[in-house]
Amino acid sequence: MTERLEGDVPVQSATTAASLVRETATLAVSGFGRVGYPKAVPLALAESGRDLSLTVVSGGSVGEEIDTELLAADAIERRFPYQATPEAREAANRGTVAYQDRHIEAFGDEVRQGHYGAVDVAVVEAVAVGEDWLIPSTSLGHTPACVEAAERLVVEVNEVQPLALQALHDVYVPDPVPHREPVPLTSPGERIGGPRIEFDPAKLSAVVLTDRPDSPYSFREPTREDEAIAVNLATFLSAELERNPTFAESVRLQFGVGSLGNALMGELGRIEFGDRDVAYYGEVVQDGLLDLVDDGSLSAVSATSLALSETGQRRLFERVERYAERVVLRPAEITNGAELVNRLGVVAVNSALEVDLYGHVNSTHVDGTHVMNGIGGSADFFRNSPLSIVTLASTARDGALNRIVPRVGHVDHTEHDVDVVVTDQGVADLRGSAPRERATLLVENCAHPSFQSSLEDYVDRANTAGGHEPHETDR
Amino acid sequence: MTERLEGDVPVQSATTAASLVRETATLAVSGFGRVGYPKAVPLALAESGRDLSLTVVSGGSVGEEIDTELLAADAIERRFPYQATPEAREAANRGTVAYQDRHIEAFGDEVRQGHYGAVDVAVVEAVAVGEDWLIPSTSLGHTPACVEAAERLVVEVNEVQPLALQALHDVYVPDPVPHREPVPLTSPGERIGGPRIEFDPAKLSAVVLTDRPDSPYSFREPTREDEAIAVNLATFLSAELERNPTFAESVRLQFGVGSLGNALMGELGRIEFGDRDVAYYGEVVQDGLLDLVDDGSLSAVSATSLALSETGQRRLFERVERYAERVVLRPAEITNGAELVNRLGVVAVNSALEVDLYGHVNSTHVDGTHVMNGIGGSADFFRNSPLSIVTLASTARDGALNRIVPRVGHVDHTEHDVDVVVTDQGVADLRGSAPRERATLLVENCAHPSFQSSLEDYVDRANTAGGHEPHETDR
């Protein structure tokens, strides 16, 4: 059995490790889905009183020690590729932190290429470390790429994260472009790597012991709209599986991170899968999946993070080795990789803020200007999926706000990347349709009745103005 | 040596073959870059006097026999995934033909999945045919997928297309999802298939002999803006190759189809490649590439179509076997495939109509409503490239129209997919930048001086309104 610490590793206090980070460093941290991120060193940095102007890059979202505490210490000047705390969102919208959301799939290569400056230090949470390897904790994310790109490495060994988590990990790291080989993965549950991230031992600058738990996720209870969306999605998918030869034998599913995604995962039992092999190939394991693993509905679950509630995390931790028979954690460049999503034929289900008449989707910017979290992996899956499905409630703010709109204020996914839109009202299957047909399908099938007639009026006026994608006014 | 016709193939007149196409058929045709498309059967259909309502799908753009003549006969009701004639454009904008442009990369799978209905007949141009194989002519496009999906197959053997073209072809067809294996291609010039497309012999319904040449391309002469863009691009790329380890040994380039792309290809000599291996991995071979093949500047050219001018085509036809030492034609799902563009590290250079302050790109819809041609393969390359570059003149209509705009009227490529913008005015390297920084870079470096102050005013007003991607008004 692997020990927490093996060989001659430089154990130090968090404060000492934090002092290795220079004032204007590019700091890469582990973490994805708000788990598996380092806690002690960011807190020590936040409490250091130093005048820091850091560029912080992560795999995905991280917890409050970074995106709340370190941010509040005015230590973060630049932040990529994703954030999910109210404070980080506010800083992005004020423009006081230079933030841009980025495609998860591509972010590892962007870090390797130096888009965010040379990475000075990577601070990574692990369950165990040796002189030239570490075993990640609850997420893999872009930790391999960050470790590879960093000049120095600090490892936080977190003793509340079970050592047994190693049984879940499958660390396969693509070679650098242009020497990259095809990723040899051809089924969702296959293992092509091992539990360890390896590194040049000269990089290992500090090992810090910690016992702070991850910030647990919390999901809201499913709403009536969530339920209606789940029913409409199940009806559509049950028919599609019968019709489409791509799904004759197997179905691989991905659901977006969040309460709607979690609710939909919990309602998978509504879909008539028949005797098809059903697997999950997505970004995160959410609570909704655990029952399906337990009852054998899913033959495999592949993800990069265990984004569970406190209850869900306890449930998994108690039986990690049992779950490891079916659950695999991979680097985000594999879970979200274009070639894998395409090859495995992953059905992608992601939520959105609003959809326009022609199928363009806004999933990030309220009013087109104020960012929520970021695009995350949604476009990685939509772009390469043989069946990409947008799910959203037809209205927001207790029915006051229409979400099927003439024009979206910000485009994250274009008309070319979305096949089907599902709301609480119904389903618009946009495949093989021209723009004017799309408008009709979306208004008739997906819009809320209280907004249908004003949308129909808009469509009439727009069609009079003319064009391939008619709009009432130019710009 | 392969004969034009081998074995017992059902030679028939174009008129007889055309009668196999039922009135409301989904008709799949070969063709990409306006070459290698069938001519005789579409003309016979156009002249048949029948009341046709066809869905026509192709690999990419085709010539006038289809998108002008057959269209003028009112025979086309639906058209995907690309068009490039004035008549087809007008029909799309009037809404009299249901048209949508689609990603080239994904279109073969969309046809296989039945997005455009079951394919009744594929009509394919070839240089030779046997009982269960054909050899394509000047383009491969989505011909393999169309042949695979079609119930019946009609082959036009075109005797003006040299039989020697077979030396260029490398037909590798991915297995259907979910049984798809990694594509075993790891360098631009490698060959992983053979010259033939194979099919179930029961499909072969007619073979038609023809001698109509392809509609030749014509390129406008490079403008002063084209020259300035070429100089700015060369300066940027020369520095980037030195800096970026991805390009330490080799560079693989793609240029968009069209006059600007052709002009930029012709100016590749301006880039300081040093002793790097330089190859082309794109959609089409345009005239600008032939000199570089002849003088040995390019070690390999991989494309799906020979989109040459009449002069260029003659030049290639006279020495096909010589060119075949370095030029490979592949199916479009390989030339544009996400995994290949990523793995090979293709630098993507594509033009656009307009770019907004945050890096969103409109490459298809004038005024946001009127389609030009379509997205084509531009997003296939931009999305998966390690370095995606938009090239455009800073103004249009003799300086009257600004092309660096507050908001684009239609988004084809989002801020996440574009790394660098190059105009005649300069270069904006957007990598690692936040939205407000992007606005400054684009206004200062890329906008035309005559529009800079009004853009600066807009940026000031937008920043006052606030948000992560500030805009003056909502929507």
Image (tube, coloured by chain):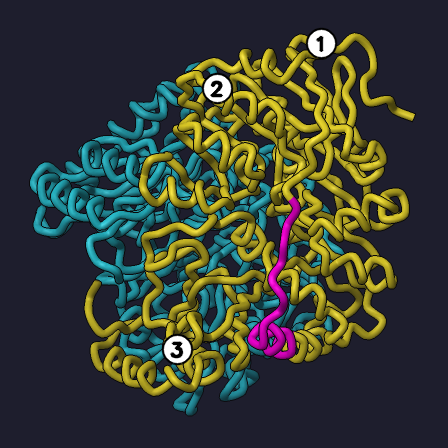
Chain colours: A yellow, B cyan
Residue drawn at (47%, 58%) of the image: B103
Q: Chain of mark 2?
A: A
Mark earlier in primary sequence (2, 3): 2
In the image, A367 versus A180, the foreground residue is A367
> What amino acid is found at the position of numbered circle 2 in the picture?
Ala
Q: Residue furthest right?
A: A1
Q: Is residue B346 visible?
A: no
Q: Nearer the viewer, residue B433 or B12?
A: B433
Name the chain letter of the residue that bears numbered label 1: A
Q: Position of residue B211 (x, y in %)?
A: 44, 64
| Residue located beneath label 1 in the image | A10
Tell me the CA gap for discs 1 and 3.
Answer: 62 Å
Residue B379 horizontal side relative to residue A166, left or right: left
Q: Which residue is mark 2?
A: A118
Residue B74 position in % (x across, y down): 35, 84
Query: Is B390 one of the magenta-colored residues?
Result: no
Separation of disc 2 and disc 1 at Cα? 24 Å
Question: Which label belongs to residue B9?
Answer: none
The residue carrying pointer 1 sits among few (fewer than 14), some (14 to 19) or many (20 or more) residues within 10 Å by Cα, namely: some
Residue B452 as seen in the image, left or right of residue B186:
left
Image quadrant of residue B134? bottom right
Instruction: Please give left or right for residue B204 compared with residue A462 in the image.
Output: right
Residue holding disc 3: A439
Categorize mark 3 by other alpha carbons within 10 Å: few (<14), some (14-19), many (20+).
Answer: many
Count of numbered tags: 3
Is A364 located above or below residue A164 in the figure?
Answer: below
User: Tag 1's secondary structure?
Assistant: loop
